[in-house]
């Protein structure tokens, strides 16, 4: 379940953020980090995540304000796990009132945090089980890809590259981020990613008037949902 799940960690304590990365990344989570409220709010509203881990007490913009603005202004429904050292019932109620889905009091055990993340991901699974970009559909449960209803055949690594691009849509993904999401800290030879991108392009764009997979020179790749007619 965890492989490829994208988490945003908004936490100003560098040691805690580092501990979360060291614990969660080897388990297959793809992590982004924001060290302050302004950066966290920007990432939360401009990217798609499976779960956001959000500290309450942040510099510049509080976690409560981030959560409120995500829900009210940006209409973001992504599950939010709120972290805080404040353990009063009134504090928890304020967090839930701002739109949080779960609440974890510091200090906490990392296995408990992951269990709560898993519960939030499972609760939101119907929305996460299928990725859709225009005519391109990826059933994550069955690992089936189709475009305009026609099956698309890719090897597992090319599937993973496509999944990362679909999760990022409509944003572009850098080559470095793609390589890290697929291969972690052991990136392949320089032409390996290009080979998988070529396979994806051949599978989804060959013969199509409008191409879905765009190469951004010296940056990376982006999916574009346009009609294939």
Image: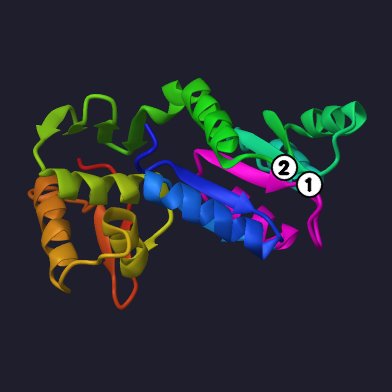
**Residue where numbered disc 1 is placed:** 56
Question: Residue 64 is drawn in which quadrant?
Answer: top right
Q: Residue at x 29, y 76 (%)?
A: 217
Within 10 Å of disc 1 (Cα), the crowding (few <14, some 14-19, many 20+) is: many
SS label for mark 1: loop
Residue beneath the point at 47% across and 23% down: 122
Residue 140 position, x and y percent, is: 29, 31
Query: Along the horizontal axis of the image, is 31 left or right of 13?
Result: left
Q: Secondary structure at mark 2?
A: strand
| Quadrant into which the C terminus falls | top left
| Side (left or right) of 59 relative to 13 | right
Q: Is residue 181 above or below residue 77?
A: below
Region of the chain picked out in magenta, as a range:
36-62
Indicate which disc residue 83 carries: 2
Quadrant in the picture for residue 201: bottom left
Viewer-nearest residue: 223 or 22: 22
Asked whether residue 147 is in view, the answer is no
Magenta-drawn stretch contains 59: yes
């Amino acid at each position: 379940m965890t492989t490829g799940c994208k988490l945003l960690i908004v936490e100003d304590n560098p040691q805690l953020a580092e501990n979360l990365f060291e614990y969660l990344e080897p388990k297959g989570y793809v992590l982004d980090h924001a060290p302050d409220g302004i950066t966290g709010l920007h990432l939360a509203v401009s990217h798609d995540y499976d779960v956001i881990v959000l500290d309450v007490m942040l510099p510049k913009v509080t976690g409560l304000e981030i959560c409120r603005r995500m829900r009210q202004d940006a209409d973001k429904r992504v599950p939010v796990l709120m972290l805080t050292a404040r353990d009063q019932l009134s504090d928890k109620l304020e967090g839930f009132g701002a739109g949080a889905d779960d609440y974890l009091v510091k200090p906490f055990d990392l296995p408990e945090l992951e269990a709560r993340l898993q519960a939030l991901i499972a609760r939101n699974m119907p929305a996460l089980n299928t990725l859709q970009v225009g005519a391109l559909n990826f059933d994550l449960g069955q690992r089936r890809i189709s475009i305009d209803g026609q099956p698309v055949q890719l090897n597992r690594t090319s599937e993973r590259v496509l999944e990362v691009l679909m999760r990022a849509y409509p944003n572009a993904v850098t080559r470095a981020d793609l390589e890290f999401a697929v291969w972690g800290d052991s990136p392949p030879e320089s032409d390996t990613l290009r080979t998988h991108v070529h396979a994806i392009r051949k599978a989804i764009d060959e013969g199509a008037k409008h191409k879905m997979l765009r190469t951004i020179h010296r940056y990376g790749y982006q999916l574009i949902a346009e009609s294939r007619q």
